[in-house]
Amino acid sequence: MIYRKIMVPVDDSKASLRALDEACELAASSDAEVLAVHVVDLTQFNWGAAEFTNHTAMREAIENMGAEVLANASQKLNESGVRHETKILENGGDKIADVIVDEVVASHCDLIVMGTHGFSGLMNLLMGSVAEGVLRQATVPVLLIRYQDGDNK
């Protein structure tokens, strides 16, 4: 299958950076565009609200970190010679997987390439799995890239 637009969620983890590498290779081989997205989780503002009296500064810091993650992804995509765009998505209380899947539909992506973070057992139960949520809901193919310590790529 030839893909036209590939979404890759990035969060600066080794798993998502490995997924970005894979998306670059796929895009280059099929002349596809890559949409690199980063989800800013605004629900963090509810954590310890008494400790943070300046929510504007906190929001700016979180958004700046997201912009930096996307700038790094854009640099990698430029180096690969792949057409791309980047986008920050805001999560105001939905599951992150829902935000990603909604954007896939809105942006007319036909493939999702994303990293898994290797949680298993109790940690997966407690943390949930964004990749698993995307996999269950997506109406397009999903390529999951697993990073394990010791991987050279």
Image (cartoon, grey):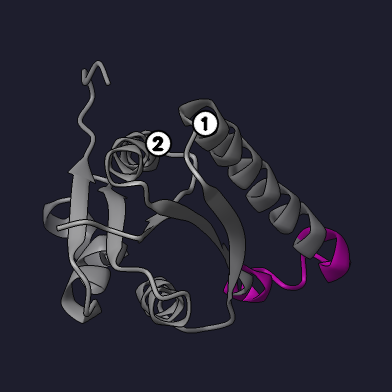
**Residue 129: quadrant of the picture:** bottom left
Q: Is residue 82 above or below residue 33?
A: above
For label 2, the residue is 17
For label 1, the residue is 76
Q: Residues within 10 Å of mark 1 (few under 14, many from 20)?
A: some
Residue drawn at point x = 77 percent, y = 53 percent? 61
Q: Are marks 1 and 2 in contact (CB under 8 Å)?
A: yes
Type of the residue with mark 1 = Lys
Q: Is residue 52 above or below residue 99?
A: above
- Magenta region: 43-58
* Residue 144 point in image, percent of width and height: 19, 51
Judging depth in this view, the residue of 85 and 132 nearest the camera is 85
Residue drawn at point x = 75 percent, y = 50 percent? 64
Type of the residue with mark 2 = Leu
Lateral position of residue 112 relative to residue 64, left or right? left
Q: Residues within 10 Å of mark 2 (few under 14, many from 20)?
A: many
**Residue 22: quadrant of the picture:** top left
Q: Residue furthest left?
A: 121
* Residue 34 point in image, percent of width and height: 44, 52
Residue drawn at point x = 27 percent, y = 62 percent? 111
Verify whether residue 83 appears in magenta. Answer: no
Residue 53 shows up from this direction:
no
* Residue 29 point in image, percent of width and height: 27, 39
Distance, label 1 to label 2, CA atoms, is 9 Å
Quarter in which the C terminus is drawn: top left
Judging depth in this view, the residue of 131 and 35 nearest the camera is 35
Residue drawn at point x = 26 percent, y = 71 percent? 134
